[in-house]
Structure formats: structure tokens, C-alpha cells
Amino acid sequence: MKILIVDDEMMMLEETKENILAACPEGEITCVDNYVDAIKVVEAMDYDVACIDIEMPGMNGLELAKRIKDIQPNINIIFVTAYSEYAMQAHEMYCSGYLLKPIRPSAVESAFSNLRHPVVEGQKKEQLRIQCFGKFEVFLGRESLKFQRERAKEILAYLIDQKGTPATTREICDVLWEDEISMGKKDYFRVLMGDLRKALKKAKASDILIAEKNHYSINMERVDCDYYQFLKGDANAVNAYQGEYMIQYSWAEKTAGYLENQKKRDWL
């Protein structure tokens, strides 16, 4: 279960986290102390539950909950607050719980047992299927994943090619635009990353993209990729490779040469 906690008081943030972990030890918890970061992480990652303080500066928890629900309609909202007077407004928003501070693990357990949108633990997410041999394509089940801009798809292709190695913004921009990188192109890169996140989020695969301190990489365990299977020595993947690798991207020629050499050396 993926859980977001939002509270502007650090001590309460840690206390809420400890009580949630006591009630839900398997929970994957993200903590933020302001509404701006809360909106950012919800745009980047799917969450099952958001535990939100109500009295916060800039945007109160009720307003933040509405923003979060606009982004993720099926997220469970649990308000965690020292004030009882907001209970009616909270329930009008069809929240999944209203916990008064100081909270206890038993109260958390009760709220989590009665979520408006139940979370099925152990339910396996459908993996994205990545086709690198021939043209680069991305599939969820039998459907091709749609990208608003082709360059966003190319960013994903490049990160797949990097096999989990983090790439900087500058490195990715150098690949996309071989000429000098202007400020306008850096701004456009941010637009493309937004497109990529939206496409992955729609496929419920936001967690394949790892973004840390201006570095981006792929969680290799969350994709089914012919290229990765080739590298593991899978015979079907090796036989599927016929000398073509991400043929729409010139920068992929180096990897294509490597794969050709590997196939000749190990399989011919």
C-alpha cells in the first residue's frame, strides 16, 4: 500500500508515520511538509491513501484534498487533525477517515480497514511491455501506450537503453538535440517529462520512472523488455533480435552494434 502523509509540523509528520507503520508495517510511505510538494508527488506517483493535516499554511488540507482528488480520483483521503470542527466538511468530501491527533495505531487500523476505495494487497500490477527490437514501442497488455509528444517517448527509450543507469537532464537534452542546448529547450524538456509522467500514470506505471536530484532512470524490475531479456541470455529474445534496435533513433546505433557482436560471439 502506497501512503502519502502531509503535515507542516515535522514532529507530527514523524509521529503520524510511526503510528501508520505500527498499524500497516507493509506500507510504502512518502512524507511531505507542504502542499506544493504534495501536489508534485501525486502528479508523479500513484498512491492508495493520503493522510492530510487540515490546518496548514498556504493551502489548508481540505483544499489540498480536492486538488489531489482531481489528480487521482480514487485515492483514499484520511484527514489527520487536532480540530473536530472540520469533520462535517471532510465527510461531505467522501473521505475515508477523520482522525483526531494524537492518533493511535488502533485508529489508523480501523480507518484503513474501512477505506472507501479498498486496496487489494498483493494484487500484481500489469507490467509494461517494452519492444526495443525493430522500432521502439511500449505496450500495456495489447494496447500501444500513447504519448502526447514523440520526444517524450524518446526520453523513455533512452532511459530504457541506459539499463537503470541515471541520466542527467543535460545528458538527455544532448541526446534529443545534438546542437547547443538553449534555455528554451530546457524548458521544453520539462514539458516532455510532464508528458512522459502523464503517459506512465495513465498506464498505472509511474513507479518505473525514478527521478532524483536532476537524475532520471528506469526501474528495470517493472518492465518486460526484449533488450533486457537478451542481456540475460534468454534464447527467445536472442533469436528475436535481427539486427534492428530502436531504429527510429540514431543514438541507438551504438547499442545495436553491441547486440550484434554479442549475438555473433555467444550464439553463432
Image (cartoon, rainbow, N blue to C red):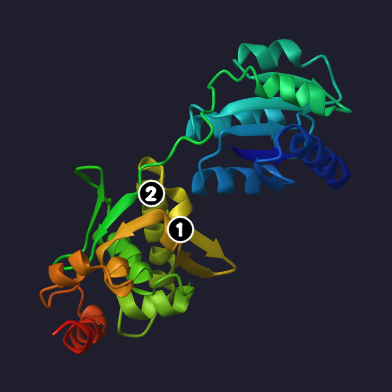
Viewed as shown, does residue 7 lie left or right of 210? right
Along the polypeptide, which appears first: circle 1 or circle 2? 2
Q: How far, Cα to Cα, is label 1 from label 2?
A: 8 Å
Query: Is residue 248 in sight in this rendering?
Result: no
Residue 170 spot, x, y in % from top left = 45, 78
Nearer to me, 38 or 235: 235
Q: Mark number for residue 164?
A: none
Discs 1, 2 touching: Cβ within 8 Å: yes
Q: Name the residue that disc number 2 marks.
A: 200
> For mark 1, does the 10 Å Cα neighbourhood hold few (<14), some (14 to 19), or many (20 or more) residues?
many
Category of crowding for the residue at label 2, using alpha-carbon neighbours closer than 10 angstroms: few (below 14), some (14–19), many (at least 20) = many
Asked if residue 55 is positioned above or below residue 12 in the image, the reply reads above
Q: Amino acid at mark 2?
A: Leu
Residue beneath the point at 48% across and 27% down:
73
Residue 35 percent coordinates (x, y): 67, 42
User: Which x, y percent locates residue 48?
Assistant: 56, 33
Q: Amino acid at mark 1?
A: Leu
Q: Nearer the viewer, residue 125 or 265?
A: 265
Q: Quadrant of residue 240?
A: bottom left
Which image quadrant for residue 231? bottom left
Helix, strand or loop at mark 2: helix
* Above or below for 225 versus 17: below
Determine whether, in the image, residue 76 is placed left or right of residue 97: left
Is residue 11 visible from the viewing direction of this image? yes
> Is 101 situated left or right of 4 in this image?
right
Residue wearing tag 1? 209
Q: Quadrant of the C terminus?
A: bottom left
Whether residue 227 is situated above or below residue 55 in the rendered picture: below
Locate residue 65, reporting x and y percent.
62, 29
